[in-house]
Amino acid sequence: MIIVLKPNIKKAEETAVLKEIRKLGYRPHVIRGVERVVIGAIGDERTQHTLETLTTWPQVENVMRVQKRHKLVSRESHPRGSVVKAGDVEIGGRKLVVMAGPCSVENEKQLMKTARAVQKAGASILRGGAFKPRTSPYEFQGLGEKGLKLLAKARAATGMPVVTELLAENHVDLVAEYADILQIGTRNAQNFQLLIAAAKTGKPVLLKRGMSMRIEEWLLAGEYVLANENPNLLFCERGIRTFESYTRNTLDLSTIPIIKEESHCPIVIDPSQGCGRSSLVAAMCKGAVAMGADALLIEVHPNPAEAWSDGAQQVTIEGFAKLMKDLKPLAAAAGREWPT
């Protein structure tokens, strides 16, 4: 069940509600929104005492039954939608956020040049891979901790928060030390122990959709983050595997209205991985903005032809600057504030 508390209540009033929920045999999970606190009470509503009597408490605004399996990420648990904060950047609010940077961190010169360029063009979060999951063991696997240190250096120089991929449980503390947002990639989207470990850092978690994952499975994977007391979840559509071979993946933009309908968590679109072709990135971004995406995750490289990984899907610095200008009127038409 979902218990919505009234705004501006005292801490003691919230504590009393939590105590009562536990007393009745439920496990409470607190979601702190911008305006009010929402509590997800996990338990079998068919056999345990009802919590609907809490509606008589003066600090409680509403009590709702949620029969969906993804209780905490559901729209019912947080009707207004969540805002996730990374550094000073808010994702899920009125302003549309752009995360941009190279697929892989290659060296300091490449990263710094890209970071300064994407920031100048209007990006507010820097992306870059330090640990890279590759299909072949002989392909570039990333710089590891050296790459993380370069990302931290770029953050210090630009002020942009950093999002980078977390591959393994034994890397959690290391990556969390340097990153502002922990990305869980498509291959790990149902690695539940990794999701739990990432959630327990308290850092925002960007959960990419698995390449063959149904939307309900994606929502349930996200439930692992919130169920471990981390409300800072971002869903990221990055394309799914279909029979089509013209593009690397099939970018499913229908997930934007679906996630908006089913969940309160922000939705991010990755058009670079989504189609695997730099020539299609601009069109996919335009579609995503028009449909109401909260953020874009775009791969940018100074010279994609010489990129150490996925050069075909990375746009040039000049191409990114043009794209940002082209997106501005679309964002305005969609009722979103633009970063520049």
Image (spheres, helix red, strand yellow):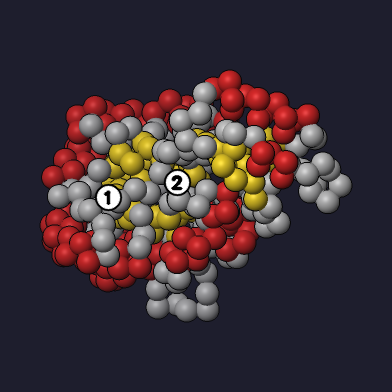
How many residues crowd mark 2 within 10 Å: few (<14), some (14–19), many (20+)?
Answer: many
Q: Is residue 324 above or below residue 106?
A: below
Q: Is residue 98 above or below residue 293?
A: above
The residue at the point 39 percent across, 28 percent down is 178
Q: Is mark 1 on a helix, strand or loop?
A: loop
Q: Is residue 332 above or below residue 177?
A: below
Which residue is at the front of the view, 17 or 171? 17
Which residue is at the front of the view, 273 or 67? 67
Residue 327 on image: x %, y % = 20, 63
The residue at the point 57 percent across, 49 percent down is 77
**Residue where numbered disc 2 is placed:** 82
Marked residue nearer the N-terminal end (1 or 2): 2
Q: What element carries label 2?
A: loop
Q: Specify the quadrant of the image occupied by residue 175.
A: top left
Residue 127 on image: x %, y % = 33, 44
The residue at the point 59 percent across, 27 percent down is 14
Residue type at numbered disc 2:
Ser
Residue 306 on image: x %, y % = 24, 54
Would residue 238 be seen by someone viewing this image from the given angle?
Answer: yes
The residue at the point 29 percent across, 42 percent down is 125
**Residue where numbered disc 1 is placed:** 95
Q: Left or right of 301: which side holds 43?
A: right
Q: Left or right of 18: which side holds 335?
A: left
Toward the right, the furthest residue is 47
How many residues crowd mark 1 within 10 Å: few (<14), some (14–19), many (20+)?
Answer: some
Toward the top, the furthest residue is 12
Asked if disc 1 and disc 2 are in contact, CB closer than 8 Å, the reply is: no
Residue type at numbered disc 1:
Lys
C-alpha separation, residue under disc 1 versus residue under disc 2: 13 Å
- Total number of numbered discs in the rendering: 2
